[in-house]
Image (tube, rainbow, N blue to C red):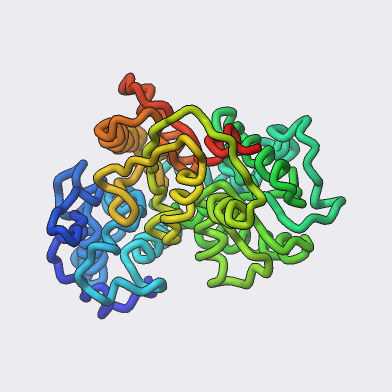
Amino acid sequence: MKIAYAYVQCCLRCRTCGYYYTPEEMHFEACPSLWKHYFAAYSGGGKLTLLRLIHEGVLEWNQEVADIVYRCNLCGNCRENCYSLAFRTPSFNHVRLMELMRAELVQRGFVLPEHKVLINSIKNYDNPWQGPRSGKDRWAKGLSIKDLNREKAEVMYYVGCTASYDVTIKRTGVATVQILKKAGVDFGILGPREICCGSIAARIGDRDLFQQLVKRNIDIFNSSGVSTIVTACAGCYKTISEDYPEFGKVKPEVLHITQYLDRLIQEKKVRFREVEKTEVTYHDPCHLGRHAKVFEEPRNVLKAIPGINLVEMPRSRMASWCCGAGGGVRSGFSQWSSETAGKRVKEAETTGVQYLVSACPFCFQNLDNAIRGTNSRLKMMDVVELVEQAVV
């Protein structure tokens, strides 16, 4: 495995990767894996210790190691709390090392059966949900959206696999389209030609498949003639904007929908009517927040809607508790994933609000299931749904 032994040694073994410390000297639980299993090996630093022991020949790559390495949401909290400056660079940090360890496990055949299903689906259908390619734009039936395969447009709405095939998340796609139309945006979609961004392949560790998807997508994006790519999926946004540059340049500007809406609001291209007074709390998706550092734009959008009052949870922005779905955990360890989401729902309930709001389809799915599973009084919403209800 091509990771310098000296870098692995940079871990101070201080265990601060399990906590998030605030300037007020308060601390919160940060690592879902550590606080589920209560054993150091499951923390960010603990996994690096496993890697060091493998380097030293004390351990070998095996299924037990795989089970520990895959019990990680790749949320990035360990990276933010690490006292070792060596782990603060984009190219070398805990998350990067976890992904490289997973790549090694995939090459050696130690991959979870549930993850094999996702990988095979991407290879066979260009999406992880075993949805037919011909049905990629079925969600958009009757919406009269430009087809970028035949027409030119300034903006590409990159829908993503989950919003295309999940009937619950479909409403996010529809709301996004309605908002863009009311704002007068010249946009279109790729339809059946849209393929997976590769985020799931990258997080699981299938680097070969990920690079194939990157190359195909870059070719599609750069030949599309659009100036901007907008997506409402936090995972797609993080992957295209932050992971793709390692392999090639995406010429169009890439924006998450909350960034684009914030811009449209400032340009007065999106206007709102006053809605019934409602209190909401916002959950920062790990991909959009800690990884991509997009914290203020979603909040700016929510605050711009007359009648919406935003109430923050104790753990927000950089300290946000993961929803539990990321890093392949939801598919590989569904019970633990649900428990993690349940903790977040309980935290949201302490704010006394009516709606738990996010900007990621994975967060939406997992938190919504936790709301139903715990009989919570909260209702799950995506930012674009609130915008669509108020936009004029």
Residue sitting at x 39%, y 48%: 284
Horizontal side, residue 62 vs residue 362: left or right: left
Above or below, 110 relative to 218: above
For the question of whether residue 336 can be seen, the reply is no
Q: Position of residue 250 (x, y in %)?
A: 64, 68
Rendered image quadrant of residue 333: top left
Residue sitting at x 35%, y 49%: 73
Exactly how many numbered labels are in the figure? 0
Q: Position of residue 168 (x, y in %)?
A: 55, 29
Horizontal side, residue 9 vs residue 242: left or right: left
Horizontal side, residue 335 vs residue 136: left or right: left
For the question of whether residue 134 can be seen, the reply is yes
Residue sitting at x 62%, y 53%: 264
- Residue furthest out toward the top: 375
Q: Position of residue 357 (x, y in %)?
A: 43, 38
Residue sitting at x 34%, y 31%: 353
Q: Which of these two is toward me, 154 or 304?
A: 304
Above or below, 111 relative to 76: above
- Residue furthest out toward the right: 150
Q: Which of these two is toward me, 16 or 316?
A: 316
Rendered image quadrant of residue 56: bottom left
Q: Position of residue 232 (x, y in %)?
A: 57, 47
- The quadrant of the picture occupied by the C terminus is top right
Q: Which of these two is toward me, 148 or 273?
A: 273
Q: Which of these two is toward me, 382 or 199?
A: 382
- The quadrant of the picture occupied by the N terminus is bottom left
